[in-house]
Amino acid sequence: MSSHTRPVLRRPVVLAACLSIALGTVGCLAFDPGSASATVAKQAVPASAARTGAGGANTAEVVKAANAFLATLSDEQKDAVLYDFDDEAKKTGWSNFPTPVVERNGLKLGDLTDAQDAAAMQVMEAALSKQGYEELVEIRKADDYLASLSDSEDTGDGASASPTATRTPPSGAPTDGATGGPGGPGGGGGGANFGSEWYYLSFFGQPSRTGEFTVQYGGHHAAYNITYAGSNVTMSPTLTAVEPEEFILDDKAYAPLADKRAATIGAVQSLTADELAAAEIDGSFDDLYLGPGNDGPFPTEPEGVLVSSLTKKQQAKVTAMLRTWVDDLDEKAAARLLAKYVAEYDETYIGWSGGTTIDNDQTYVRLDGPSAWIEFSNQPGASTDEIHQHTIFRDETSDYGWE
């Protein structure tokens, strides 16, 4: 396996130091290499794979799908899709910008044969839940819709990847390069290509039931970094976004992220007037605080209202919001992770900035716990006249894996 790094048009990023957090009532489940089937030849488990997590990963199923995909490739294609686990390209090869404004890692799905493309998508179908996979497919359909628009004056994603200089970020927000990468605010790279063929798949580390590896899949408005270590899995960071919110393509209606929109607005609007005032985050946001190119550090002082201080009904709405991200992962692992995050509500905050309604293009909502980190950002349309959304899910204890 070669170690290669592909150039990307972004500023350098620094990975935030991961925290070691007790898992509370859910328990701390150590990675157990002995849990793999004895019928499968086992690799030596590297020291980096001796992690802790919630467990429940369907690693064997993902490895099977990954190996089936790799078996369809030529040696040259395998070299292009396989990276060393610690290759820095993992942290820079994802974005909310279209390809090739920001070059992705691995193989472009549009360059594959039908059989190879189907095998690639089977990897993601194995890694995600039914709901998560359907959402991925619909986000790609949204790109096909954008590609179908004729005479577009700006085919780039004009949104920035962090708070811009024209609006005030909260204390501690990244400010260097905060114009959102190539093209700056409103730029995004006119003429870049949209469409479902502009998505890429790569592996960091050899897919293994016992070792550590990352499945990285992404293009415009979707980026998945799903890392496995034996029975443990993290999908941090994962970016999901869409423009427009709803559309019709080939006589079929689509509404990607509809569950995330409804649950997020439901959670923040469940707060009383006094709670809303206390939950307002200092500053305003054009986009994600910890999105592409901004891996950290996470804020040391959380803002918002403490979730454990809310009523049980309000907490249930926060859980419903959290679930719409966590449940994108395969079902068993998602259930365990959700239980872990809910157990941390006495250290988890929900906050907002700009607005609290879905039709306000300034609405920004954040969930900040010792582990779970979610951002939901409304913004004006870049390729249409409609609002479009960017969201990010991270786990502060397992960004790109565990430390």
Image (tube, rainbow, N blue to C red):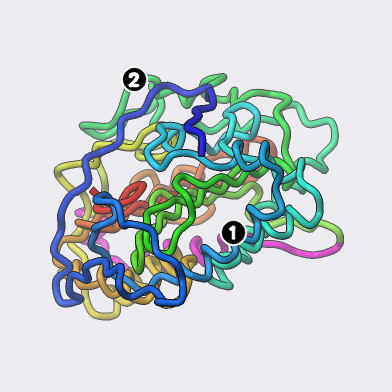
Q: Nearer the viewer, residue 238 or 170?
A: 238
Q: CA distance from mark 2 to mark 1?
A: 41 Å
Frontmost of labels 2 and 1 is 1
The local crowd at label 2, few if under 14, some if 14 to 19, many if 20 or more residues have their Cα within 10 Å, is few
Residue drawn 44% across the image and 47% down it: 205
The residue tagged 1 is: 67
The residue tagged 2 is: 176
Q: Nearer the viewer, residue 91 or 48?
A: 48
Residue 49: percent from the left, percent from the top?
29, 55
Residue 140: percent from the left, percent from the top?
68, 52
Residue 189: percent from the left, percent from the top?
64, 23
Which callout, 2 or 1, points at the residue further toward the start of the chain?
1
Give, as a three-letter code, the residue at label 2. Asp
Residue drawn 52% across the image and 20% down it: 184
Give, as a three-letter code, the residue at label 1. Asn
The local crowd at label 1, few if under 14, some if 14 to 19, many if 20 or more residues have their Cα within 10 Å, is some
Q: Are marks 2 and 1 in contact (CB under 8 Å)?
A: no
Q: How many marks?
A: 2
Residue 106, numbered label: none
Can residue 324 be seen here? The reply is yes
Q: Is residue 123 left or right of residue 205?
A: right
Q: Is residue 138 magenta?
A: no
| SS assignment at label 1 | helix
Q: Is residue 107 above or below residue 250?
A: above
Can residue 376 be seen here? The reply is no
| SS assignment at label 2 | loop
Magenta extent: 251-278
Q: Nearer the viewer, residue 82 or 39?
A: 39
Prevalent SS, magenta region: helix
Residue drawn 43% across the image and 64% down it: 209
Residue 347: percent from the left, percent from the top?
15, 61
